[in-house]
Image (spheres, rainbow, N blue to C red):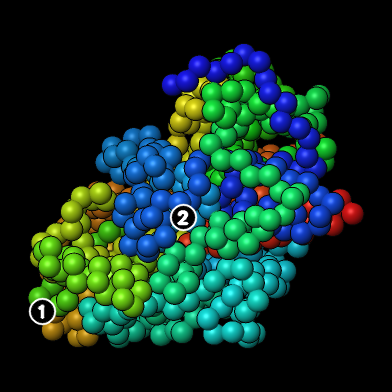
Amino acid sequence: MSQINDEQIDHGAYDYIVVGAGSAGCVLANRLTQNPKINVLLIDAGAKDDYLWIHIPVGYLYCINNPKTDWMFKTAAQSSLNGKSLIYPRGKVLGGSSSINGMIYMRGQSADYDGWEAQGNPGWGWKDILPLYKGMENHHAGESEFHGAGGEWRVEPARLSWEILDAFRDAAIESGIPSTTDFNRGDNEGASYFEVNQRSGFRWNASKAYLRPIKHRTNLTVLTGARTTKLEFEGRRCTGVRFIKDGEQHIARAHREVVMAAGAIGTPQLLQASGVGPTALLGSLGVPLVHALEGVGQNLQDHLQLRMIYRVQGARTLNTLANSWWGKAMIGLEYMLTRRGPMSMAPSQLGVFAKSGPEQTRANVEYHVQPLSLERFGEPLHTFPAFTASICNVRPTSRGHVNITSPDTAQHPEILANYLSTPEDRHVAADSIRLTRRIVGQSALARFKPQEIKPGVTEDTEEALAKAAGEIGTTIFHPVGTCKMGHDAMAVVDSSLRVHGVEGLRVADASIMPTITSGNTNSPTMVIAEKAAKMIVAQAA
């Protein structure tokens, strides 16, 4: 590690400093600099997004849990997961987690946003958010009631299908789940292939969509490899940031605002390290208190996936296709020639949204169905044909936290998601396993003779199934909520995303969600940034 000089380098003053060049930060930088009179510094601790495997869709296998592209976080041991600690992927390059995620385009449900508004956050209802989604979209089907065509965020259909996934879709429909052609109209119940954020067989990340087209703008400065160490305050006004780049300490000042876009892990970590957060936590670590805000880092929500694996017969799966050098070569050749085939595929192609039980009023579980299986992430594919039906409770009631363990932002915080810590979540988990077994038992899948490998528990009690869920459960890395929007005692930002109790500081990323959206969270994070940018510009006028 290089020696850090004691002397600080003055990096100048800007109208706005955006901390984090991930999914939200790229959007903010683009929108704020549309006005040439507004000067923006976009700062990120990660690197440029120039690693080859970022851009090839199947490359997520080589990006997650890779220190070149992933911050390599881990959760604390989760007692509800039978003592397991989980890897917790977060993107370490421009585009953030949009550079390493599963590329699934998902908005959630209209009721998610209406719920935010009902909690005292005006302007966040579905009627307000849908136009923003349409404005940011470049949808393959063109302009329609629910989609837009002129935006930066490219949405395309999946580029391949699998007979085994078609059969699972048909089995889901056979079990009473409706078919759908579009998960993004406000009610996502149904079974279909996912739409993805790709362009012509390549990953389409936030950096490509929002940063690269504006690299010529002279009012935007982008810094990579610059780790923010502290927010600067004068009294309770945030005036800038300190950061380390190339072993040297820098300071940059913000005339108007600092906007936090470091994500549901990075944003609360930096707020706490800068003296904004829970009094007891900061006091225990000797962090001087700027403003007591008990909710910073609390309210962590995430989607836990239960990875049920089924061995099959007579089915084409990636396990068998990629089980030889010849097979790998043919897969590579197909991609080179056509940008299709397994190398173009998102990690999950088929989606199903369903009600886990009759008491549910709207879809509360999501399937990611994959024509492959492996023991755990990072290990080789199984050698036998199989598929994985991963099922998530999309509205968990369990809540966790992100708490710093040191004032040094180079040290990872404690991440405790508390999965399956409520009776409601354990009940949904048990019902999820039962639902999967009902689907797999339908006639549409019978010809493949599916055999359950995981969890493989035969006892059908709530206790046995909840324990099995803990055994096969792992994160799908959708952390949100750690700086939630609202006005209660644990709220961190108001409905304009300004941090309560201080001035010149906003949060505009997944951490502001009061409750998690009912599906994949990347595009909802970007729409939060779209709305934040509009509010910032309007309030600055």
Residue 269 against residue 387 in the figure, above or below: above
Quadrant in which the N terminus is drawn = top left
Residue drawn at (68%, 52%) of the image = 29
The furthest residue to the right:
541
Identify the residue at image location x=61%, y=40%.
223
Number of the label disc, if any, that sits on residue 314: 1
Mark closer to the observer (2, 1): 2
Distance between the Cα atoms at labels 2 and 1? 35 Å
Residue drawn at point x = 84 percent, y = 57 percent: 538
**Residue 406's mark?**
none
Residue 479 seen in render: no
Amino acid tagged 2: Ser
Q: Is residue 203 left or right of residue 383?
A: right
- Which corner quadrant holds the C terminus? bottom right
The tag on residue 99 is 2
Q: Is 446 in front, or is 19? A: 19
